[in-house]
């Protein structure tokens, strides 16, 4: 069987003709399999959606209860057969509920990674490498310059600043799904026990994480809190809010941004970030390489990100590789569909 008989890129997304399903389609389709809840992978308007329970819950929060005509829960590690094609979801370690999807028939096995990371994350299940014939990988940070630093040290940078400037509020820009909750959990692991304050756009998803067992400590809405009570406080908000007029109501705020892109200092300066925190929910260059080798795949397809560099590396170690040049998938700067009201 040719790989293109099992999965083929189309304008709407990766398509499995044998089962007549799409994976992470960017346009409305009859049947969609969704790897995770970020808005560039999980969209509304599909006829039916198969995803993990957490991803379905996240889509319901972001898009409303009727985001698809029908939904079905995918149990991790348990296969579902559609027209003799077996689909199996495995943890991807990206955000809560994120999954790789194995697509298998007649001895050919393709793994669609979705977005993934290999670094520890107390808020979601870790990535589980799976052997396959073809591995379809993201490459958001697919350049040698991207080697993520020690997370504990990034959190300590924040906590040292809080201690050094007790009269100032610290605004931490973090994307509403996954990043904000991970940063909160890491702050708690570092021993910080004071209340953490939330911008309104982060509340629903953060509460969902807490209800699913994430240990996030005491969280409070920042709306309505007197300015003088926020001296020395840590407030989490969408990245766009740190440059908004909203940020001016806090006492001499230290602007922070948690993102893998903060490795590039020019990006921090462009955003007016005083304290960049290199915290990424994507695999860095060494982890992309490690993951590809662990799958023992003989062929690699690269969906989005820095495709050319990763394809070149794969070919240099004897693997067949090609970029898929998929359109419609973003990077760590995913859009924020929720209300920006505080």
Image (spheres, rainbow, N blue to C red):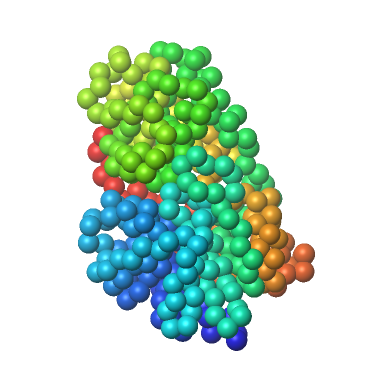
In the rendered view, tell whether residue 253 sits above or below residue 39. Answer: above
Q: In the figure, residue 133 lies in which quadrant?
A: bottom right
In the rendered view, tell whether residue 214 sits above or below residue 105. Answer: above
Spot occupied by residue 139 in the image (x, y as percentages of width and height): 58, 58
Residue at coordinates 41% horizontally, 39% vertically from top-left? Answer: 214
How many numbered badges does the structure rendering display?
0
Q: In the figure, residue 28 lies in which quadrant?
A: bottom left
Spot occupied by residue 270 in the image (x, y as percentages of width and height): 49, 39
Q: In the figure, residue 211 lies in which quadrant?
A: top left
Which image quadrant: the N terminus? bottom right
Q: Residue furthest bottom?
A: 1
In the rendered view, tell whether residue 258 sits above or below residue 115. Answer: above
Which image quadrant: the C terminus? top left
Whether residue 300 appears in this view of the structure is no
Spot occupied by residue 12 in the image (x, y as percentages of width and height): 41, 73
- Toward the viewer: 54 or 289? 54
Spot occupied by residue 99 in the image (x, y as percentages of width and height): 48, 58
Q: Residue furthest front?
A: 78
Residue at coordinates 43% horizontally, 49% vertically from top-left? Answer: 96
Residue at coordinates 61% horizontally, 58% vertically from top-left? Answer: 129
């Amino acid at each position: 069987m040719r790989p293109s008989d099992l999965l083929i890129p189309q304008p709407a997304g990766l398509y499995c003709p044998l089962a007549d399903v799409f994976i992470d389609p960017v346009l409305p389709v009859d049947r969609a399999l969704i790897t995770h809840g970020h808005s560039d992978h999980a969209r509304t308007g599909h006829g039916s959606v198969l995803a993990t329970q957490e991803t379905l819950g996240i889509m319901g929060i972001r898009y409303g209860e009727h985001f698809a005509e029908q939904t079905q829960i995918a149990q991790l590690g348990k296969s579902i057969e559609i027209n003799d094609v077996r689909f199996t979801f495995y943890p991807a370690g990206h955000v809560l509920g994120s999954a790789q999807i194995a697509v298998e028939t007649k001895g050919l096995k393709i793994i669609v990674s979705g977005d993934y990371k290999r670094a520890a994350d107390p808020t979601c299940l870790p990535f589980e490498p799976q052997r396959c014939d073809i591995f379809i990988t993201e490459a958001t940070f697919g350049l040698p310059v991207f080697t993520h630093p020690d997370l504990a040290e990034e959190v300590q940078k924040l906590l040292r600043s809080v201690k050094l400037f007790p009269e100032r509020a610290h605004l931490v820009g973090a994307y509403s799904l996954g990043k904000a909750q991970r940063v909160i959990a890491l702050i708690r692991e570092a021993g910080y026990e004071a209340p953490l304050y939330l911008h309104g756009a982060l509340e629903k998803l953060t509460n969902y994480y807490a209800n699913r067992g994430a240990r996030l400590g005491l969280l409070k809405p920042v709306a309505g809190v007197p300015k003088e009570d926020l001296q020395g406080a840590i407030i989490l908000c969408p990245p766009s809010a740190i440059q908004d007029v909203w940020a001016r109501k806090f006492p001499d705020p230290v602007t922070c941004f948690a993102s893998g892109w903060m490795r590039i200092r020019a990006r921090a300066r462009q955003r007016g970030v005083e304290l960049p925190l290199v915290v990424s929910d994507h695999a860095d260059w060494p982890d992309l390489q490690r993951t590809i080798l662990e799958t023992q795949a003989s062929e690699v397809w690269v969906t989005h990100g820095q495709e050319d560099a990763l394809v070149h590396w794969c070919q240099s170690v004897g693997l067949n590789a090609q970029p898929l040049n998929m359109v419609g998938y973003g990077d760590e700067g995913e859009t924020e569909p929720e209300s920006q009201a505080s």
